[in-house]
Amino acid sequence: MNTKIAPMDSCKPASNDIGCPPTNGFVSTIQGPGPAPAPASMADATLGRHIARRLVQIGVEDVFAVPGDFNLTLLDHLIAEPGLTLVGCCNELNAGYAADGYARARGVGACAVTFTVGGLSVLNAIAGAYSENLPIICIVGGPNSNDFGTNRILHHTIGLPDFSQELRCFQTVTCYQAVVNNLEDAHEQIDTAISTALKESKPVYISISCNLSAIPHPTFSLEPVPFSLSPKLSNKSGLQAAVAAAAEFLNKAVKPVMVGGPKLRVSKAIDAFVELADASGFALSVMPSAKGLVPEHHQHFIGTYWGAVSTGFCAEIVESADAYVFAGPIFNDYSSVGYSLLLKKEKAIIVQPDRVVIGNGPTFGCVLMKDFLRALAKRLKHNETAYENYHRIFVPEGYPLKCAPKEPLRVNILFQHIQSMLSNGTAVIAETGDSWFNCQKLKLPRGCGYEFQMQYGSIGWSVGATLGYAQAVPEKRVIACIGDGSFQMTAQDVSTMLRCCQKSIIFLINNGGYTIEVEIHDGPYNVIKNWDYTGLVDAIDNSSGKCWTAKVHHEEELVEAIQTATGPKKNCLCFIEVIVHKDDTSKELLEWGSRVSAANSRPPNPQ
C-alpha cells in the first residue's frame, strides 16, 4: 500500500504520519487520495508557487529565510502562498538552526537563502540536521539559467566561472541535491527532492535559478497531485528469524533492561518501544540524546543511561544486566563518556532503523525497528527483575543546600526552580555546555518537550532552534537554557523571536566563558568578553514592549523573576540573565570533561 502526502488539515491530530504535526515529534502517513486537484490559474502555475504548495502540503507552515538578490522573486511566491509564512532571520546560520528546531517539533522544516554566500553560511546548520536525522528542505536562489555553461564570472562566487562549488559542499551533508535551471524537469526534481527528504529523514538541497520562479509552465497548471512514497517494509522471513533469536536471547536472561536511543525518532518506533516496555516489564532507560522521546512517567522508567554521568542508580542497573536491548543507539565519544561505558557486546541486542544485531552472533538486515519491537513484545516473558533491583537500591535525590539570604546564586538552585516550571505546556531547549548535564536531570512531566543537539554539538544552536521550535508549536512555552559563550555566537535572532511575538523564556547562564571546554582543556581562549546581556536584549527590543528582561544574582531575585515571567509577563518573551560563579558546574560535567579529555589526548598508536 502506498502512502500519500495530504494537506495538514485533513489529518487527525493523533496521527503519526507524514504531513501531520505528530504526537512523538516526527512526521509520517499521509492519507488516501482526496478530491481531484483543482486547476490553478496560469498566474499561479509557476515554479515558485508549486514549491510553496508542496511545502504546505507536507506540513511546513513557516519558511526561515534571508533575502538575497538571487532568491527575491522566489520569496515573493512563497509569501503569496496561503498557509505559508516567511520568517525573516538575521543570518543564514540561524535560519538553518531555526529550520532544525522546527523539524524537531513538526517533523520537517524549510529554509531559503541566496546563492553561495547564503548557502555556505547555512551549511553548518544543515550538517547538524543531517547528523540528527532531521528532514529540512534547504532552498537556494541560484544564478540565472542563461549563465550555466558559460564562462561568465558572477558575484557571490569565488571568482571562477564554475557555479558548482556550493553544490559540491552540500553533497556531503544532504541526501539529495536538485539544481533546477530549466522548467521542463523542475516538477520532477522538486518532488524527488522533497520525497527523498521525507523517506530518508535527512536534509535536501534545491537550487532554483533566479529567473525561473515567476514563469508559468503547464506542469504546474494543477494543484500538486499527492505523490506516492513507497513504504519501507521488513523482510518477513528476516523479521521472524530476528524476533525468534532475540526472544530466545532475552527469555534466558535474569535481569534484562531496555535503553532507547536517538534513532527511535527517525525510525518512527517510539510507540513500539513503549509497547515493548509495557509487555516485557523490563527496566526502561534512555541514552542522553533520546531524552524527551520516551515518556519519563512510564512505571518502569529508571532515568538516563550515560555511563559514569548517568542519572542516579541507572548505570548500575544497566551495566549489571545480563542482557540489554539498545533501540536506535549512537555510541560516539560524547555519548560513551570518552569510550568508557561498561557494556559487553555479547550481552547486547542492537536494534538500528533497519537492522538487528544480537550479541556476537547473527545480524538480520531489512528488518524495520518498529516491526521488530512490536513483534518481539508478543514473544517475551514478563520480567521485572531489573526494575525491582532498581527500586530496592534507589535513594531519592536530596535537595541542594538552601541559599542564605543574598548568597550568590548557584546553578543547582537555578535548575531546582526550572524543574518547578515544567508542565505539558512547556518544552526545554538545552544548549551545548553544562546545560546538557543540568537539563538531563530534569524530570519531564507528561507532554513536556525536550531537545538538544548531542551528535553535532554546535555551540550557538539553541538560539535558532528556540526560534524554530517556538514557531512550530506556539501553544507551548519554550524554556531555553543557554550559556553566555553560546549566546554570543547567535544572539541576533532574539530579534526574530520578537518580530514573531514569541513568548519563550530564555535563561542566559553567565559564568564568563566556555565552561564545557574549560573542563575538557582549559586555557585563556575559554574566557570571553562579558556583555551586558539584558541591555543588549533591551536594545534589540527597542522599546517595542514585546520583551521583558531581568538580571539575577541571588535566589530571591530568581524567584521574583520567574514569578513575573510566568505571571504578568507570560505573553511576551522573557530573558533572564543568571549570574553564577565561573567554576560553578555540575559534577557530571567535571566527570565527563575529564574522561573526554583523556580520550582526546590519547597518544598515537605505535607505527
Image (spheres, grey):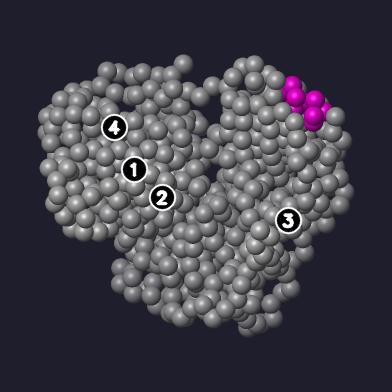
Decide which of tag 4 and tag 2 comes sooner along the chain. Answer: 2
Q: Secondary structure at mark 1?
A: strand
Would you say the residues marked 2 and 1 are in contact, meaning their CB atoms lie under 8 Å apart?
yes
Q: Amino acid at mark 3?
A: Ser
Dividing the picture into quarters, in which one does residue 373 lie? Answer: top right
The residue that label 1 is drawn on is 205
Give the CA distance from mark 3 to mark 2: 30 Å
Residue at the extreme bottom: 406
The residue that label 4 is drawn on is 189
The residue that label 3 is drawn on is 340
Is residue 533 visible in the rendered structure shown here?
yes
The residue that label 2 is drawn on is 126
Residue at the (28%, 28%) spot, across then down: 188
Give the CA distance from mark 4 to mark 1: 11 Å
Decide which of tag 4 and tag 3 comes sooner along the chain. Answer: 4
Decide which of tag 2 and tag 1 comes sooner along the chain. Answer: 2
Q: Which mark is residue 494?
A: none
**Magenta segment, prevailing SS (helix, strand or loop):** helix
Q: Position of residue 498 (x, y in %)?
A: 35, 62
Q: Amino acid at mark 4?
A: Gln
